Image: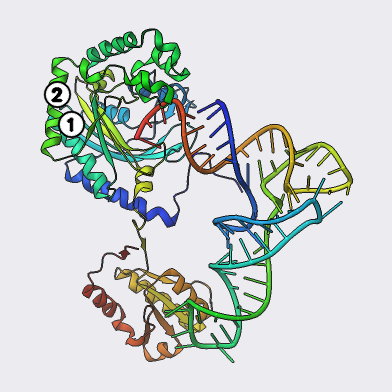
Amino acid sequence: MIPGIRGTRDILPAEVGRWQQVERVARAVCERYGYAEIRTPVIEREELFAKGTGESTDIVQKEMYAFTDKGGDRITLRPEATPSMVRAFVEHSLEQELPFAKLYSLGPMFRYERPQKGRYRQFHQLDVEVFGVTDAAVDGEVIEMASAFVSELGIDTAELVINSVGCADCRTRFSAALLEALGERVPELCGDCQRRARTNPLRIFDCKVPADQPIIDALPHSEDFLCDACRAHFDEVKRHLDAYGLLYRVSHRLVRGLDYYTRTTFEILGAGLGAQNALLGGGRYDHLVKRLGGPDRAGIGFAAGLERLVLALSEGAGGTTVADAFVVAIGDASWPAARILARDLRKAGLTALIDYDGHSSKSQMKRANRSGARRVLILGEDELARQQVTIKEMGTGHQHTVARDQVTAHLLEIFHGRHRDDGIHRA
RNA sequence: GUGAGUGUAGCUCAAUGGUAGAGCGCCGGACUGUGGCUCCGGAUGUUGCGGGUUCAAUCCCCGUCACUCACCCCA
C-alpha cells in the first residue's frame, strides 16, 4: 500500500456530511451578506506571498510548498487565500464589475508544518474579503457575519476577541515602546521571545511560557499607542459591535501573525479544540492592495478553518444520505426488470439502491438493512408475472403490493405527505 | 524545526523472550422468496518498516516511518 502524505487526510464518507453542512452554511451566509464567490488557483507565484503575506512571517520563511516549475518559474502552493484574492481583485478590476467588492472563496491551503490537532499540511478555509471600504461599519458587519456564521453552525461556546494594532505609524511607535519597556529584561525572557524582540516585538504577546507572563503583563497596550484616527476607528468598530448586541472581549494581546494587518484584528476561539483553538481570524489590511500593485484600496476579511469548524460541530451534526428504496430482485429472470425499476425511481428523483451480483434475497435484504434504506421494493418472479412490486417498510416490517406502473407515483405520494427533503435526512 | 507518547485483524484492544487472541464488524448456515434479534460455523494478521542482541523477538536495543498531543506557527 502506498500511504497518503503526512499532514493530509481523507475526509471519509462517515464525516463528509459534517463538511457538507459547514460548506452549505458558509455559502448561505456569504450569499446572504452580499458576497460573490470566486475561485482562484491553488498555485501562485511565490513572490505573491513573499510580498503579500510578508517576508518576515514563518509562513513565507519556512512553510511554503514552493518549487521551480519546468519553465523555470518560482511557484508555490498557496499557504493562505488573501493575497490570491487581492491579486484576482486587481488583475480583473473587480471593483468595476461588482456593486460591492465583497468576495468569498472556499478551498484548500498548504503549509509545511508539523501536524497536530486542528492543524494539517493541507487544510481548508473559507476566506472572506471586502475591498475599498474604510468605514468602520464594514469592520462591524464583517465581524457580525463571522459571528453569525459560527452560531448558525450551532457552535455556541465560541468567544469573540478583538483588538486594534493601529496603522503603520502606531505600530512603529508601539514596537519602540515595547522594546523600551522591556529594556534590559529581554534576556530574562524565553528564547522565542528574545527572537521576537528582534524580529517582531508585537508577537511577544503570543508567548505561553509561564515565567514570561509577569514581564509581559507589565508591558504597555497597543490601544494606548493608537493615533487619533486609529483610536476613533476602533471606538467606532466597538460601537457597531455593541449595536449588534455582540459579546466580545478586547484583548491587547491579540496580535495576529501576518504582516499586513492594520487597525482592527479579531478572532473567534472555539472550546475543546486543543492548542489550535482559533476557528477563524482576520482583520483589516489597508495597504495590501496597493502593495501588490493595485489601486490604493483598503481591505478587511477573515479566514475560517474548516477542519476546526467540523471539529467544533456538535456530535449529531451533518447526516448522511439514505436511500428512499432498495430494490431486491429474486430469481434470475427478475434482474433486468429490477434494474429498470431502479432506473425509473431515480428518474423520478428518488434515491434507489440495487445489488449487482445475483445474490440471494437474504443477502440482498441484509445489504438493504445495512444501507439504512427505508423500504425494500421486491421484484420476484411472482411479482413479475402479476405486474406488481412488493413494498416492505423496513421500520415496521409490514409489506404490501402495488401495481408496477404505480410504484413511483405511490412513493412520491408518501414523500409528498412527509415534506421530503431531497433524500437528505439528519441522523 | 523541537519534545513526549503510541504503532498487534476492517475497528476497539489483549497477550507472552518460545512465531498471536477477544469483542465488535464481515461472510455463511439454522430460515432453499425477506433484513434487524438469537444460536451455530467461518475467513483475515508480513504484530508499521529495517537492522541488532539472542538458540529463539510481537515483547529487549538502535534506526526509520507513521499517528497523537504539545512547543513553534496559525485557520
Characterize the local packing of mark 1: few (<14), some (14-19) or many (20 or more) Cα atoms within 10 angstroms: many
Is residue A58 shown left or right of residue A28?
right
Query: Which mark is nearer the camera, 1 or 2?
Result: 2
Asked if A201 appears above or below A412 in the picture, the reply is above
Counting from the top left corner in percent of width and height, residue A124 is at 38, 40
Q: Secondary structure at mark 1?
A: helix
Task: Give whichever of A239, A189 is nearer the camera.
Answer: A189
Task: Give whichever of B3, A424 is nearer the camera.
Answer: B3
Q: CA distance from mark 1 to mark 2?
A: 9 Å
User: In this figure, which residue is indicated by the disc labeled 1?
Assistant: A139
Q: Earlier in the sequence, mark 1 or mark 2?
A: 1
Characterize the local packing of mark 2: few (<14), some (14-19) or many (20 or more) Cα atoms within 10 angstroms: many
Counting from the top left corner in percent of width and height, residue A72 is at 48, 22
Q: Secondary structure at mark 2?
A: helix
- Name the quadrant of the C terminus of chain A: bottom left
Q: Is residue A141 something that shows in the picture? A: yes
User: In this figure, which residue is indicated by the disc labeled 2?
Assistant: A233
Q: Is residue A99 something that shows in the picture? A: no
Report the residue at 25% width, 10% height from top.
A173
> Mark 1 and 2 residues: CB-CB less than 8 Å, in contact?
yes
User: What chain does mark 2 sit on?
Assistant: A
Dividing the picture into quadrants, the one containing residue A377 is: bottom left
Counting from the top left corner in percent of width and height, residue A327 is at 41, 76
Task: Give whichever of B63, A362 is nearer the camera.
Answer: B63
Report the residue at 14% width, 23% height from top.
A233
Dividing the picture into quadrants, the one containing residue A340 is: bottom left
Q: Which amino acid, mark 2?
A: His
Asked if A369 appears above or below A219 in the picture, the reply is below
Q: Which amino acid, mark 1?
A: Asp
